[in-house]
Amino acid sequence: MTLSKHRSRQIYCLLIACTLFSHSTFQSEAAEQVCVVASVRPLATDAGIAAFEQGGNAVDAAVATALTLGVVDNHNSGLGGGCFILIRRSDGTLLAIDGREKAPAAATRDMFLRDGKADPELSTMGPLAVGVPGALAAYDLALKKCGLKTLGELLLPAAEIAEHGFPIDRNYAGKLADKAQFLAKFAGSRAALLKLDGSAYDEGEVLRQPDLARSYRKMAEHGPDWFYRGEFAAQVGQWMAENGGILTAEDFADYRAVERTPIVTTYRNWKVIGFPPPSSGGVHVAQILNMLETFDIRAEHKQNSIHATHLIVEAMKLAFADRAHWLGDADFVPVPQGLIDKNYAKSLAKRIHPDRTGEVPAHGNPPGAAAKFFGQHTTHIAAADSGGTWVAITATVNTSFGSKVIVPGTGIVLNNEMDDFSSQPGVPNAFGLLGAENNAVAPGKRPLSSMSPTIVCDSSGEPVLTVGAAGGPKIITQVLLTLVRCLDLEMKLDDAIAAPRYHHQWRPDHVLVEAALPQTIVDGLKCRGHCIETIDSSGVSQAIGIDAGGKLLGVHDPRIPGKVGRGVRTERE
Ligand code: GLY
């Protein structure tokens, strides 16, 4: 590291100084390699650390964590779903892998309408809700491009957990109890996830998934072809044909994970790397930061934290109005690059009234809107190693247990990502999000996502922070708030993640605030005309930064039990 790089990293370290770890620095011990992983499940974090300690890097660790989450956290993510992977390699190059689900070839624009009206049940549960899963293809591509391990090596330990089972915690038991009546509608899901009498497992009981273990072992033996061109695709295609679905084995065979060009913008002196469409996250995190850059948020916050919160909420609202209109799969529809233009952000920021909330009747008009375009319950994994590889994976099956469908004998929960399309203009999806023509259903199209894996580098290009989240559209605002709190307000990373959050998504026109947000801020927002709704939790973020000693520092969201793991490997000379 050059002196200037070291200095700028040190400056950042001071900003997020924290003392979770007391081990020696990775800079001072050349032979010692370190990897940090943060995820929502201890077993998954442990699998990631084991992959590193057995010779892998941060990419292997992150993928091992993701594969294990598909066993122990399959209501949130798994191989029946999709993901976005953002990687900063040790040589500084970037890789963005799009493993987002796709609509089946037989999908049609109006497939979720009945008697001219959107029927949300069709897009959220059962055969029509399922998009072609992309997670496995993305993990495989990430390993091939940047990993040191094979997919098979990482699948087998997860298969062991599926076979021998794991005691479910309160969070999992709650999700299962909540969705048991819907899972019971599908024979495969009932057999895989419920007791013989159809009831849900309680906290502390052991869930064994022998079918899932078998599927993982088949993939370890035959590679992704077993899933995309073999037995699994055939089984799903047959089940769909027999149960009113449109997804076919050919849809699986046609699926490819795609390399995208990451969105790279600046926020003050930082370089912010985000995921491009079909994620809306990268665009709107950048857009909101661009608006905030026109204010001095740090000074505003010091002077009056209510005022700073008001500015951030108004910027969120303006960005989400644009999201509803402009965003969709850029392979299918024109998504203007002007959305992240600094001057466009200035023009939006000028609309923010300092003392009261403003009416945002519709989207804005970014420059080049007709000419320059971008070429989108969930979980986030953060991993980084001392070699300089940083990884952000956000993965999902959409809402809890996705479509609720497990095709008998497979153990794999299938997503309900089709609900992330706009079924009908003006009709909100499961997250209350509105969409327009750009996010209408079309064959082979990817539904718009809010998943926002993000990496921040300092001015010399050294990675200093990675963050991502679960929580539907609140993913975007969680990531934004973590960036603002670390980069502007100089909060410690763990404090930034723990601090109460707020969210505005344009429609409905209210600010969602976590109950712990100070009453003075809530009252101040009300005085400025904001409608307030209180929520228990805005979602779950995981992050990695660098502490004052230059060490990797992982943080998992305290809102649910998760785990940060730290692996150490001593390389022989
Ligand atoms: N399924 C949630 C998202 O991708 O935004």
Image (cartoon, rainbow, N blue to C red):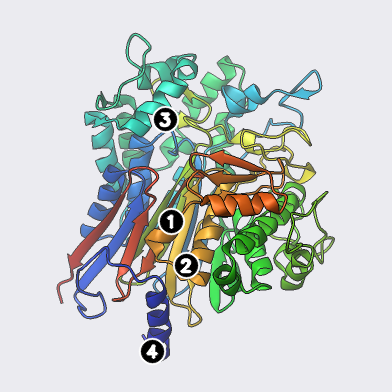
How far apart are labels 3 and 1 at the CA level? 31 Å
How far apart are labels 2 and 4 at the CA level? 24 Å
Looking at marks 3 and 1 on the same chain, the residue that comes earlier in the sequence is marked by 3
Marks 2 and 1 in Cβ contact (< 8 Å): no
Name the image quarter holding the C terminus. bottom left
How far apart are labels 1 and 4 at the CA level? 30 Å
* Type of the residue with mark 1: Ile
Disc 4 target residue: 2
> In the image shown, does 223 or 440 lie closer to the viewer?
440
Residue 231 percent location from the top left of the image = 43, 29
Residue 344 falls in which quadrant of the image? Answer: bottom right
Q: Write down which quadrant ligand 1 falls in.
A: top right
Q: Residue furthest top?
A: 197
Q: Element type at marker 3?
A: loop
Q: Residue at coordinates 36% horizontally, 57% vertically from top-left?
A: 555
Q: Element type at marker 2?
A: helix
Disc 2 target residue: 486
Q: How many marks?
A: 4
Name the image quarter holding the N terminus. bottom left
Of the numbered discs in the image, which one, if any, rests on residue 412?
3
Whether residue 492 is situated above or below residue 451 in the rendered picture: below
Residue 546 percent location from the top left of the image = 36, 70
Tell me, yes or no, if residue 211 can be seen here: yes
Marks 2 and 3 in Cβ contact (< 8 Å): no
How far apart are labels 3 and 4 at the CA level? 48 Å
Q: Nearer the viewer, mark 2 or mark 4?
A: 2
Disc 1 target residue: 497
How packed is label 1: few (under 14 Cα within 10 Å), some, or many (20 or more)? many
Q: Nearer the viewer, mark 3 or mark 1?
A: 1
Q: Residue at coordinates 57% horizontally, 30% vertically from top-left?
A: 130
Horizontal side of 3 relative to 416 (left or right) equals left
Looking at marks 3 and 4 on the same chain, the residue that comes earlier in the sequence is marked by 4
